[in-house]
Image (tube, rainbow, N blue to C red):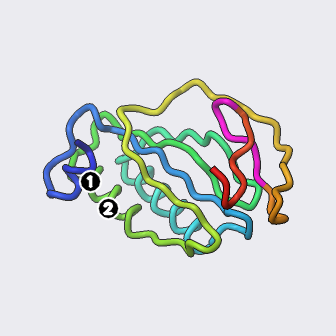
């Protein structure tokens, strides 16, 4: 519903008031300009009162972060739509960076901490552990 609302220009439904965001390096380091832009977009939304909750659930071994942002109870649907569209205009280098913007009803407040060790993949790259199970992320080229 949320994505359909964004694509059609319709207002966001009340139950869709949060967005899970993930940007991380996939072997090479994260696309730093894209990562900084994501941080700036979130920061501006916090400063404008559109977002009042930002929960970071993890940091990537090659840089980046994963987390969730939640709209302020007083935020207007149009402002939240504009924030999401702005996030969707960010296009990191796909050779170095995985990026996703996924709508959700709310941010999970239970925080899961994983150890920061890394696993060496057959191609020589490294992957870290991923919450909530804390299992290692799949190596590039595997499922």
* Magenta residue span: 127-133
From the viewer's perspective, tell me whether residue 7 is left or right of residue 58. Answer: left
Which quadrant would residue 45 be assigned to in this image? bottom left
Instruction: Please say whether residue 65 is one of the residues in the magenta stretch.
Output: no
What residue does disc 2 label?
85
Instruction: Please say whether residue 129 is one of the residues in the magenta stretch.
Output: yes
Residue 36: mark: none
Dot 1 and dot 2 residues touching (CB under 8 Å): yes
- Give the answer, above or below, for where 119 lies relative to 85: above
Q: Position of residue 70 (x, y in %)?
A: 41, 39
Q: Residue at x 38, y 63 (%)?
A: 88
What residue does disc 1 label?
81
From the viewer's perspective, tell me whether residue 143 is left or right of residue 89. Answer: right
Secondary element at image label 1: helix
Q: Residue at x 27, y 50 (%)?
A: 3
- Give the answer, above or below, for where 111 lies relative to 65: above
Q: Residue at x 63, y 72 (%)?
A: 31
Q: Position of residue 6 (x, y in %)?
A: 23, 55
From the viewer's perspective, tell me whether residue 42 is left or right of residue 124. Answer: left
From the viewer's perspective, tell me whether residue 72 is left or right of residue 26. Answer: left
| Along the line of sight, the residue nearer the viewer: 110 or 8 | 8
Q: Residue at x 72, y 32 (%)?
A: 113
Q: Position of residue 137 (x, y in %)?
A: 69, 46
Secondary element at image label 2: helix
């Amino acid at each position: 519903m949320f994505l359909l609302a964004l694509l059609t220009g319709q207002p966001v439904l009340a139950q869709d008031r949060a967005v899970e965001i993930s940007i991380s390096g996939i072997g090479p380091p994260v696309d730093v300009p894209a990562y900084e832009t994501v941080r700036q977009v979130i920061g501006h939304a916090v400063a404008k009162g559109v977002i009042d909750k930002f929960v970071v659930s993890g940091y990537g071994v090659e840089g980046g972060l994963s987390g969730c942002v939640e709209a302020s109870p007083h935020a207007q649907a149009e402002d939240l739509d504009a924030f999401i569209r702005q996030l969707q205009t960010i296009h990191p280098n796909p050779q170095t960076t995985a990026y996703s913007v996924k709508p959700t009803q709310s941010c999970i407040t239970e925080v899961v901490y994983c150890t920061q060790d890394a696993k060496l993949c057959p191609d020589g790259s490294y992957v870290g552990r991923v919450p909530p199970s804390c299992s290692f992320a799949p190596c590039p080229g595997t499922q």
